[in-house]
Image: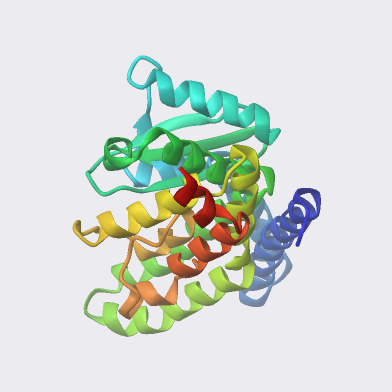
Amino acid sequence: MWRPAVLALRNIAKAALLYGGFVVAFTALGWWLGGTRLATLSLVVALLMAGTVFWYGPRIVLASLGARELLLAEAPPVWSAAERLAAAAGVARPKLYLLPGGHPRALSVGRGVWDTGIALSEGLLTVARPAELDAILAHELAHARHRDVLVQTPIVLIAGWIVEVSRITGFLEKAFLSVLAPLAASLVHVFLSTRRELAADRFAARVCRTPHGLADALIRLEQTQELLAFRGSPVTEPLYIVNPFPSEGLPALFETHPPIGERVERLRALDPEWREKLRAA
């Protein structure tokens, strides 16, 4: 079992590799196409692009999803819970955003413990019970504590850009998509492991002092998703607390979440006597 500090260091190293690799690859492409002069220009452009992704990536992702800031007056209990759980998790209070639509989902973006944004959908705020909402917030805060957001945010942006290239190829879109989508998916899976979700689940259970709030939330999300269809870019799958897309076709390429049943089983196992406690109650 990885400790938060170890997970954070691993993700910082991954982020450094991602940004550094992008700059080196873009510069090498410029050198290959036009020698030293174009390589120098490519280096400057690559540094500017990397800086833009680092500083403005979270805003770009949230804007692409139609998220807006969730005002304190709109949901005081949610803001209060986020502040309380952030203190328990050892991270700065996150910025809260609202995603449109009735489909229940949550995600986090940012650059680490000092700068994290958590987006909750209108549907999630409607169906989640207080204990479940606390657990969902704690799970997303775990991604900030472990620095998962430092890798997830740029990976989703870059993979999305790769896939979008196919849209500008006109009648060749399907042919380019068949090549670019697997390439983008490979990049996602190189940097993002399913283990990050399991680690976030354990951390959330520790912060909430019980694993059952998150286990119940995962079950509720799974049941609700069966009733509501969701449309969006499958490249964003790594951001969500559960996979909102069908596990087939193009969305299956970007799937990075363990099955919900496995996650619930692991959470319940953290409290082996939960069935006896439930009978006693």
Q: Going 63% across and 56% down the picture, which residue do you hit?
A: 270
Q: Quadrant of the C terminus?
A: top left
Pick the front one: 53 or 274:
274
In the visual, does 109 lie left or right of 113? left
Going by the picture, which residue comes out furthest to the front?
280
* Residue 28 drawn above or below residue 237: below
Marks counted in the figure total 0
Q: Looking at the rendering, which quadrant does residue 55 occupy?
A: top right
- In the displayed structure image, the side of residue 243 where residue 192 appears, left or right: right
Q: Is residue 85 above or below residue 154?
A: above
Looking at the image, residue 126 sits to the left or right of residue 11; the answer is left
Residue 25 locus on image (x, y percent): 66, 69
Q: Nearer the viewer, residue 177 or 82?
A: 82
Residue 150 seen by the camera: yes
The colouring scheme, among rainbow, by chain, secondary structure or one colour, is rainbow
Front-most of residues 202 and 252: 202
Q: Quadrant of residue 74?
A: top left
Corner quadrant of residue 15: bottom right
Residue 188 is situated, as x and y percent measured from the top left of the image, at: 54, 68
Measured as percent of width and height from the top left, residue 141 is found at 58, 40
| Residue drawn at point x = 36 percent, y = 48 percent | 105
The residue depicted at 62 percent of the width and 51 percent of the height is 50
- The residue drawn where x is 44% and y is 43% is 60
Please indicate whether residue 90 sits to the left or right of residue 253 in the image: right
Q: Nearer the viewer, residue 189 or 218?
A: 218
- Image quarter (top left, top right, bottom left or bottom right) of the N terminus: bottom right
- Asked if residue 232 shows in the view, the reply is no
Residue 93 spot, x, y in % from top left: 59, 26
